[in-house]
Image (tube, helix red, strand yellow):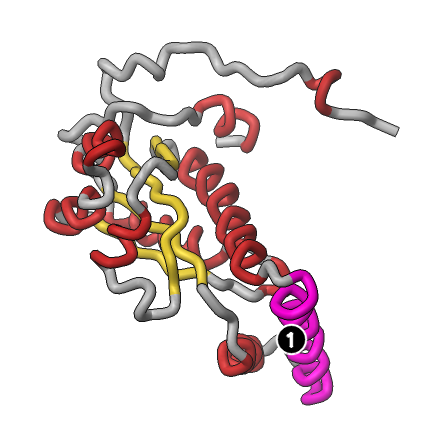
Amino acid sequence: MEPIKALNYRYSTKEFDQTRKLSEEDLQTIKKLLQLSPSSVNVQPWHFIVATTEEGKKRVASAAQGDFSFNEPKILDASAVVVFSTKTDISDDFLLHITDQEDQDGRFAEDQHKKGTHAARQMFVDLHKYDFKDLQHWSEKQVYLNLGSFLLGVAELGIDAVPMEGLDMKALDTEFNLREKGFTSCVVVSLGYRASTDFNAPLPKSRLNKAEIIEQV
């Protein structure tokens, strides 16, 4: 599927067909989409939980109670659910870990290139940590970069999705011990196939006019 066709195909799925499940091949591709996303200076400040079992989805749905109960069916009826979480801090050790991985993957022809890359990445992280004082907000921006490419990627596969922020993120963090691991959840995406009764499926897509939002110079 071409990108524009995929973007026209996708929408926020409100009701999933419980009888249709993602294939194991698609699940592996979904994991690659999460892994291969771009991020600023390749900092990759994220962690993902992919729930495919009924028990796993129930654990995610523990965050869809009370005021957020309207999202519970979208979690339980989906074929798979992905929890996107972001780092609460970015340590020097983590930055060295990224650079070592890049080295293993053959990105540096010379050792000085490795040192330079690490120094540049550390400069940007320190800028947001100490000067702008918005490190976690900046980290979450990287997670949303991942989310954007992820939604396009699954649409290319013909898989329906709905991203959700209307959840008790603290409950989600507690359920999966995310804060103890140095992360906090920020968005959840349910995946599967639209039900024939989904009211949102046949509605036309609506966006602001190109002339209003795009200026060509």
In percent of width and height, residue 80 lies at 24, 43
At x 71%, y 23%, the residue is 213
Write down the residue under mark 1.
122
At x 49%, y 63%, the residue is 45
| Secondary structure, magenta segment, majority class | helix
Q: In the displayed structure, does residue 40 sit left or right of residue 87?
A: right
**Which of the 4 image quarters holds residue 62?**
top left
Residue 215 sits above or below residue 165 on the image:
above
In percent of width and height, residue 48 lies at 35, 57
| Residue 104 visible somewhere in the drawing | no
At x 19%, y 37%, the residue is 65
Q: Residues within 10 Å of mark 1 (few under 14, many from 20)?
A: some
Label 1, secondary structure: give it: helix
Q: Nearer the viewer, residue 165 or 50?
A: 165
At x 75%, y 25%, the residue is 214
Q: Which segment is the magenta one?
A: 109-132
Residue 36 sits above or below residue 144 on the image:
below
Q: Nearer the viewer, residue 28 or 81?
A: 81
Residue 34 sits above or below residue 12 on the image:
below
Q: In the displayed structure, does residue 109 sit left or right of residue 20?
A: right
Residue 29 magenta? no
Q: Residue furthest bottom?
A: 111
In percent of width and height, residue 98 lies at 53, 75
Q: In the displayed structure, does residue 98 sit left or right of residue 72?
A: right
